[in-house]
Image (spheres, rainbow, N blue to C red):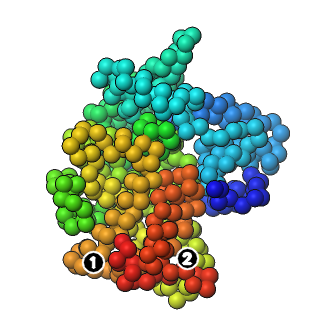
Amino acid sequence: MSTLSSKTPTVRERLANYKTTELRADLSHLTEGDKRALVKLADVSDLLNSVYYQQIWSGASQMRADLQEKAAKNQSAEAKDELHLFELLKGPWDRSRENEPFIKGVGEKPKTANVYPEDMSAEEFDKWVMTLLPEEAKRAKGFYDVVVRSGQEGALELKKYSEVYREYLEPASRLMKEAAELASDESFKRFLRMRGEAFVSNRYLDSEVAWLRISHESGLEAAIGPYETYEDEMFSAKAFFESLVHVRDFEASGVLQKFTDSLQLVENNLPIPDKYRNKELVPPPIVVVNQVYSGGDTAAPLVAAFNLPNDEEAIDLAGSKLTMIKNVQHAKFDSVLVPIARVVLKPGDMEYVRFDAFFGHVLYHEVCHSAGPHKVVGTNDTVRSRLQDLHSAFEEAKADITGLFAAKLLIDRGTIDDITLREFYTTYLASAFRSIRFGLAEAHGLGQAMQLSYLLEKGGFVYEEGRFSVDMERMEKAV
């Protein structure tokens, strides 16, 4: 059943749900070469925008061009608003309203995106995969190949990303190598060169490992390439191109590193059967950065943190890395979470809403993506491949709740001594309503709705007289 109101909002009303916020970053510690490299990486980001529009829907690139032409020709506020919202949401669907189309003539958002044929069923795909050789079957279920129809009979076949998106990936590859020549840190240079090579070879594993090994002394950080699989609503398998370009916050990175040392402690204390426990976790290094540019799979709302890579082979080889985007998190807290808290919480509870608690839970959420089993016990199948379209929402819910579990454990152990558990729980309650605004068609929004429903049912969160509050005793048991 739809949860939307009967009145369809206008484009202007949809835009009013978003707030323009300035992001600032200190570039004073960068060399002149680093600053020039940032310009090259911004150009790469713009190219990956074009790749993403091709990935998300077969009609997205042409529609974007039509909207740009329309806005340039008639200069009307309506035409400019349509283009603005389209580029803000990276397509013609409103994620906050269950992917409701906001442009006339557009149908439902295809679960296949444009990385499978829109008329392909899961059953057809599974039958086809069974006919493939093992290496091809792995590619079909993997991150970096498109499934298309070919010939008069429309048989399914694989095409590499490097072939399908050559028009944009080849110039992006050249720019990555040019940026590498300008950057000052050798490990960051290595990543840029190797990722540039991957754009044309379609072999990403080595560059994923190079990204994980960027030195903690590098002033620049960037996640550039095919990463997240949320937009593959068929199998949550195909990776979509994005670019997040950052400068490092050295002071904040050093302070937070102590929390990665606690990851195995959290894993060992999870209330799960021992056979599901990961006994050899590689603690992810934590990098705190400030964002300066983005492109590709970066639709609103802005990402505040991420734990990459998603490629299980890379994780097995070199672990993962947690990136906390500090200027984005401050913007979310000040511009969104605090105003929401004033509306949904009991007035006396506002004193428990703190940025440090918000920042801390985002940190534990991302670290806890590494917790628990990543493969089905007794098989070589990934949890992702078994859960398919359900994976993304359940994974986000797992990380949220495990993050709250970790917060209590670390407070009890004395690792956290400047944030109380009530502050964590109350800030998390307010933030739940921030996340649910993303909509049930988005993994974080759906995952948060699942949690909020459960915690209300168990009495951890309480609704009285039009406001929400935390019952500490029941909340601890519910978590």
Q: CA distance from mark 1 to mark 2?
A: 24 Å
Rendering coords of residue 348 (x, y %): 52, 89
Q: Quadrant of residue 60?
A: top right
Q: Pick out the residue farthest to the top.
A: 152
Q: Nearer the viewer, residue 29 or 154?
A: 154
Can the viewer see residue 92 in this picture?
yes
Image point (37%, 84%), residue name:
473
Q: Quadrant of residue 79?
A: top right
Q: Say which residue label 1 marks.
A: 411
| Above or below, comparing residue 188 to residue 288 in the picture | above
Quadrant containing the C terminus is bottom left
Kindly state the secondary structure of the residue where label 2 is placed. helix
Rendering coords of residue 235 (x, y %): 45, 39
Can the viewer see residue 318 in this picture?
no
Q: Earlier in the sequence, mark 1 or mark 2?
A: 2
Quadrant containing the N terminus is bottom right
Instruction: Name the disc covering residue 319, or none.
Output: none
Judge left or right: residue 99 versus residue 160: right
| Above or below, comparing residue 53 to residue 479 in the picture | above
Label 2 is placed on what type of residue?
Ala
| Above or below, comparing residue 460 to residue 44 in the picture | below
Q: Say which residue label 2 marks.
A: 341
Image point (46%, 69%), residue name:
454
